[in-house]
Image (cartoon, rainbow, N blue to C red):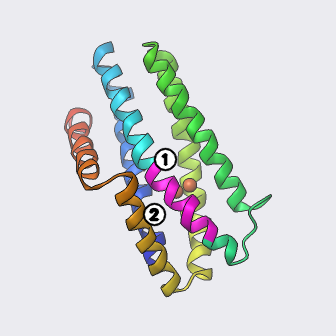
Amino acid sequence: MGKATADLRNEHEAILHVFRILDAMRASNSQDAEQQLRFGNELVNFLKIFADKCHHGKEENYLFTALEAAGLPNTNGPIGMMLHEHVLARQHIAAMETALAEKDLSAFKQSALDYQQLLRAHIAKESDVLFVLADRVLDDEKQTELFENFETWEEKVVGHGVHAALHAQIETWEKEYLSA
Ligand SMILES: [Fe+2]
Ligand SMILES: [Fe+2]
């Protein structure tokens, strides 16, 4: 496995881990409306920064362009499909935000569920198909170059302080929702 695809796979695992927390939170039913709204806002913040800006940004700005340069089709091909799903994911996040602003928990839960379903399938397609292909067509040198671009991107859109805060956030959620 290449260095760049390994980094993206790690981020997929982090997103899937947060989805397990969201599943547990949904099943617990022990949170009052205020707690659910607070968690919802924290979740949207995590998804916007980590899943969208950082992770989808790395894919769109670096990996997908490298794959296109290596001959993989964008329009009517796997890259175009992944880009389209990133757009749909953003629409679900926007719907979650609107629902939270209106304190509409049932609309929030539906949008969160839609987002999870879309992204779980999206992550499976990337990890099982696209990244396997990427490991075949991108050599070690290219993967290292991409990884270095990822690091610069992450520092630009997330930064060390926010990155640490997001990790601390996940730990707080684990204690609150996974150990219950
Ligand atoms: Fe993606
Ligand atoms: Fe991804």
155 sits left or right of 177 in the view: right
Where is residue 41 drawn, in percent x and y? Answer: 36, 28
What amino acid type should be assigned to the residue bearing mark 2?
A: Leu
User: Horizontal and vertical percent for residue 141?
Assistant: 49, 86
Beta carbon of the mark 2 residue lies under 8 A of ligand 2: yes
Residue placed furthest toward the front? 156
Which amino acid type corresponds to the residue marked 1 in the rendered image? Asp
Q: Which residue is mark 1?
A: 52
The residue lying toward the viewer, choosing from 165 and 39, is: 165
Q: Which residue is at 39% across, 62% downward?
A: 10
Q: Residue at x 49, y 27 (%)?
A: 96
Q: Give coordinates of residue 64: x percent, y percent.
A: 61, 65
Q: For mark 2, give the secondary structure.
A: helix
**Does residue 164 belong to the magenta stretch?**
no
- Res. 55 visible in picture: yes
- Residue 61 shown in magenta: yes
* Horizontal and vertical percent position of residue 20: 38, 42
For the residues labelled 2 and 1, the Cα–Cα distance comes to 12 Å
Q: Which residue in the structure is indicated by mark 2?
A: 8
Quadrant of the frame with the C terminus: top left
Give the residue at x 63% y 40%: 88
- Secondary element under disc 1, as helix, strand or loop, is helix
Q: Main secondary structure of the magenta part?
A: helix
Q: Is residue 66 left or right of residue 153?
A: right
For label 1, the crowd category at 10 Å Cα-Cα, with few meaning under 14, some 14 to 19 and many 20 or more, is some
As drawn, is 170 to the left or to the right of 128?
Answer: left
Q: Quadrant of residue 3?
A: bottom left
What's drawn in magenta, residue-wise? Answer: 53-65
**Residue occupying image coordinates x 44% and y 80%:** 144
Q: Is residue 3 left or right of residue 137?
A: left
Does the image show residue 32? no
Front-lying residue, 32 or 55 = 55
